[in-house]
Amino acid sequence: MRFLDTFMKKQLVGLDIGMSGIKAVEISQDAQPRLLAYNRIPIPCDWINLDGEVKNQGVLVESLRKLFSVGNFKTKNVAVGVFGRSIITKKISVPQMSPEDLENQLYWEAEQYIPFNINEVNLDFAILGPHTATLSSEPKMDVLLVAAKKDFIQFLQGLVKEAGLEPVILDSQAFALGNAFEFNYGPAAQRQGHSTQVIIDFGASSTKVIMIEGSQTTFSRELQACGTRCSELLMERFGMSMIEAEATKILKANESHVRPILEDYAIIISEEVSRTIDFFLSQSIDNSVDGIYVCGGGSQLLGLKDALEKRLPAPISKLNPVQHIAGSGQPMNPAALREVTCLGAVATGLSLRRKGDK
């Protein structure tokens, strides 16, 4: 999106800062992109809260420096995923007009939909096409509106620069996921004609549901049901710390006193995802979904796969963000490669960004 682009250089490292860790992926921008480097550093769960607020900027900067000091990255130019609740995307319908006219009216249109002070945000848009799901005689078009709080964008840029990195692009995590999907699965989806695909990223701080119609990301929503909320349930139930709860969720999932809690929470998440998809379909002409792809560390929650399959309207597959990205020619640690496929979708989509992307 335009306001998120600062300037563009050839090679980029995709940088995904999350509650549970920082992931970085570098992909070459050759005609056939190659996976050049990957690294991840876990971070304590109290460094970034569920709203995206960074509690200790200094230690996060040091973690970024460490990440790049041992990751074999060839550049310090980064595309950063904007996280937390300081960025909003919303699909709206407006009277048909030229892009130039829409840009002139953007702040007036956005004021009706954005819950922030309109003078405190950067705005951008993408025209999706004609809006036909209305009985109005006035021709309308669908527009994807994006708003990011200026102070958070400035903070994030400063954080990255303090770590010795150059923030070339700041982008929505939802668009990064769409970019990773489009590169790896888009051509096959296009051969089937117009299709609607769903990406679900089960993260520590939120569950992101993204809709892709054809080749366009047209809808995204962040759900509060997430990995950290599940761990908080274990904390409350057993009087344990967050670190103990995280370990219990992973290492003791099948124990008789833990399993029912995890399975119940899997149902909660799956029902929220199902309602989100139903809402999207109620607003869409094509009331069907052709495929559903899942990623993120939370996707491995005990019972989640079965709960999703019972409630969602299409086949579910794992999203492999490097499915069609060749290796660099250097041997890559198999464990690291498995991590990329599960945890690296946002960072991969960021690294695939090119000048002029929308």
Image (spheres, rainbow, N blue to C red):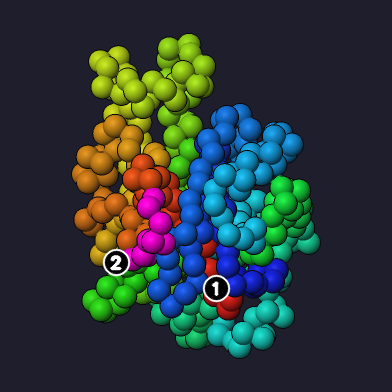
Query: Does residue 344 show up?
Result: yes
Work out whether mark 1 precedes mark 2 in sequence or the reverse, and give the earlier one.
Answer: 2
Q: Quadrant of the N terminus?
A: bottom right
**Residue under numbered circle 1:** 354
Q: Position of residue 38 (x, y in %)?
A: 48, 51
Q: Position of residue 120 (x, y in %)?
A: 77, 58
Q: Position of residue 343 (x, y in %)?
A: 42, 46
Query: Does residue 144 show up?
Result: no
Within-10-Å neighbours for mark 2: few <14, some 14–19, many 20+: few
**Residue under numbered circle 2:** 287
What residue appears at the point 68 percent right and 60 percent down from the top-left corner? 167
Where does the magenta region start and end? 324-332
The amino acid sitting under disc 2 is Asn
Residue 216 is inside the magenta segment: no
Q: Is residue 25 above or below residue 193?
A: above
Residue 328 is inside the magenta segment: yes
Helix, strand or loop: magenta stretch: loop
- Secondary structure type for disc 1: loop
